[in-house]
């Protein structure tokens, strides 16, 4: 298990697609999980998102900037 606090700046778009599972808790800002098939799920400060292994290729996006706590 890996724990990390991560901050992405305004306009960040991950340069890769991920298939690993994560638990993502948004500390500040708005996080967007974008899937390869075009779905976008927005998660606001105070909310948590769980993505299962091999559920769907996804990447991190933020329009506003975001601070996250990630468990892998």
Image: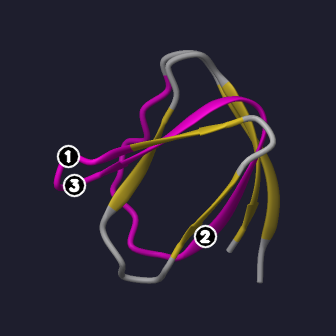
Res 65 → quadrant: top right
Task: Check disc 1: other Cα within 10 Å, few if <14, some if 14-19, many if 20+.
Answer: few
Circle nearer the N terminus (2, 3) = 2
Give coordinates of residue 15: x percent, y percent.
37, 42
Distance between mark 3 and mark 1 Cα atoms? 5 Å
- Pick the front one: 9 or 25: 25
- Pick the front one: 46 or 61: 46
- What residue sits 36% from the left and 57% below the top? 58
Would residue 42 be found to the left or right of residue 38 on screen?
Answer: right
> Magenta stretch containing residue 29, yes or no?
yes
Which disc number belongs to residue 22?
2
Q: Quick check: 4 above or below 64?
A: below
Residue at image mark 3: 36
Distance between mark 2 and mark 3 Cα atoms? 16 Å
Q: Quadrant of the N terminus?
A: bottom right
Task: Check disc 2: other Cα within 10 Å, few if <14, some if 14-19, many if 20+.
Answer: some
Dots 2, 3 in contact, CB < 8 A: no
Would residue 15 be found to the left or right of residue 63 on screen?
Answer: left
Secondary element type, mark 1: loop
Q: Quick check: 16 above or below 32?
A: below
Q: Quick check: 47 above or below 57?
A: above
Residue at image mark 1: 38
Dots 3, 1 in contact, CB < 8 A: yes
Task: Check disc 3: other Cα within 10 Å, few if <14, some if 14-19, many if 20+.
Answer: few
Would residue 24 be found to the left or right of residue 69 on screen?
Answer: left
Way the structure is coloured:
secondary structure
- What residue sits 31% from the left and 65% below the top? 57
Q: Nearer the viewer, mark 1 or mark 2?
A: 1
User: Which contiguous range is marked in magenta?
Assistant: 12-40
């Amino acid at each position: 298990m890996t724990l990390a606090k991560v901050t992405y700046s305004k306009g960040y778009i991950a340069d890769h697609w991920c298939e690993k599972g994560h638990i993502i808790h948004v500390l500040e800002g708005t996080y967007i999980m974008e899937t390869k098939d075009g779905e976008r799920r927005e998660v606001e400060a105070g909310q948590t998102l769980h993505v299962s292994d091999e559920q769907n290729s996804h990447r991190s996006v933020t329009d506003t900037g975001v601070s996250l706590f990630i468990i892998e």
